[in-house]
Amino acid sequence: MTSFINQIFQKFKAASGHHILIATICSRAFSFIASWWAYRQVGTEALAPAIYAFQIIAFLVPFMGMGLYHGTLKYGAELSSKEDKIALYTAVLHKGRKWSLATMLLLITLGSIWDMGFEDSGQYLIVFSLMLYISFEYEMQKVLFRLLHHNDKFALFEGLHWFLLLIFVVGLTPWLGALGYALAFIFAPLTTVLYGYLAYPQLFKSHIRPISSTNSINKAFFSYGLHTAFANVISKLLFAVDILLIGWLVSREDAVTIYKYLTLLPFSILFLSGAYMTTHFVTLSKAHKDRSYTRKFIQEYILIFSGISFIYLLFCRLFAVPLLRFFGPELVPYTDVFMILALGTTGILILRGLFGNLLSACGRADLAFYAGAIGLGVNIASNFVLIPKYGLLGAAVTSASIMWLTGLLSSIFYFVSCTNKYK
């Protein structure tokens, strides 16, 4: 096993991505502790309106700035000079800010007149809507680091953001309760962005000089960004629709919070696939026409993450009860739900995390969206049948099945579309 773990680390290090791996592990740890603290400090019922509002905002976050930051990464990777990449970053930043501000103001208005069925959810929607502007700045800074192959700086930002989130959650929840939990998601990226402008003015100073247009931001650029945003929203919906439907179909308000925390550990393992693909995405975008390179990459990825999935499932099987008891004894009766969700996430680790990103790397983000859309339709229909009958267990069975289904669809779309195109 030591040899296997060392092999994984060497794959990251070969791509100068070990910084990202270490930062992502730390980030997931900070996120886990922050969630545990909020759960224990605030309680299930008090936290439910904030979680519900956050799920709604989570759908819209990929569209912040009209999804332009997605296109910046893809098309910026094809630019050769540092100056061109910074110019593209600057142009996208100024265009995206306007869209983010407009969306934020619309949600503030919506939150002031609609409580979404949960008392106080409207005020949490107003607070979380600020993320659409602040997080766009944060994501754009990280995109520029990736384009310039500054993985160490990208990793620093990622780790700093989640560390600050933990600090704000711990500091604000005893004082403000669930509102403090919500405010932490605003203050953490805001502080990180301000740090970026102060610490790296040589990279971000160009944002002071607006660029009105650039030939790189064309119809294809917008289309790619929107399709990637839609694909990301679908991915979030595949996770969040269960919570939304549980809040609607189950007559227990605490069921939303319980299910949210049952998904916490299973979904946390997905950081490994995310970190691995983040490390290699720029290179994959440049080399997506090289069949021998992509074939070798796919083989190595599946081998590594099949091994990780086996070890992970064994760990969950052995330690499910103590892990759930760590959050609270009320979660222990849902051990079966926990294990089913863990099994489902291996479908993302092995298939969807790989082929969804490969579709984006070869410019077919639209197919990644279609795979997710099909999965979402099946997910919603199945949940309406299974949640009223089986409760949280029905939601977990649906989620696990959809994770594997969308992974299989993504792999089929990739091999049919991208590999046949470049021979």
Image (cartoon, helix red, strand yellow):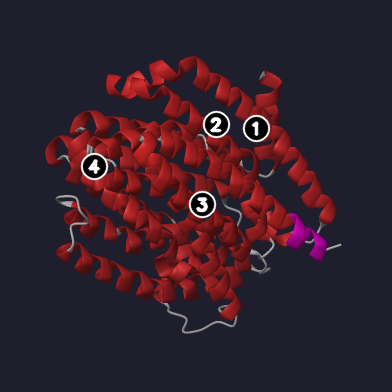
Is there any visible trace of residue 202 in the rendered image? no
Label 3 sits on what residue type? Val
Disc 1: CA contacts within 10 A as few (<14), some (14-19) or many (>=20): some
Q: Name the residue under label 3.
A: 378
Residue sitting nearer the eye, 359 or 339: 339
Whichever of callouts 2 and 4 sits on the residue coming sooner in the sequence is: 4
Which of the two discs, 1 and 4, sits closer to the camera?
4
The residue at 68%/44% (across/down) is 15
Residue sitting nearer the eye, 186 or 102: 102
Disc 4: CA contacts within 10 A as few (<14), some (14-19) or many (>=20): many
Q: Distance between the residues labelled 1 and 3?
A: 37 Å
Which of the two discs, 1 and 3, sits closer to the camera?
3
In the figure, is residue 260 to the left or right of 376? Answer: left
In the figure, is residue 245 to the left or right of 200? Answer: left
Disc 3 secondary structure class: helix
The residue at 32%/70% (across/down) is 103
Q: Position of residue 92 (x, y in %)?
A: 48, 73
Whichever of callouts 1 and 4 sits on the residue coming sooner in the sequence is: 1
Q: Name the residue under label 4.
A: 48
Whichever of callouts 3 and 2 sits on the residue coming sooner in the sequence is: 2
Label 1 sits on what residue type? Phe
Q: Where is residue 226 in the image (x, y as percent from the top left)?
A: 51, 69
Query: In the picture, which quadrant includes the C terminus?
Result: bottom right
Which label sits on residue 204? none
Q: Distance between the residues labelled 3 and 4?
A: 26 Å
Disc 1 secondary structure class: helix
Disc 4 secondary structure class: helix
Q: Where is residue 87 in the image (x, y as percent from the top left)?
A: 54, 74
Which of the two discs, 2 and 1, sits closer to the camera?
2
Q: Name the residue under label 1.
A: 9
Q: Give the range drawn in magenta.
A: 415-421
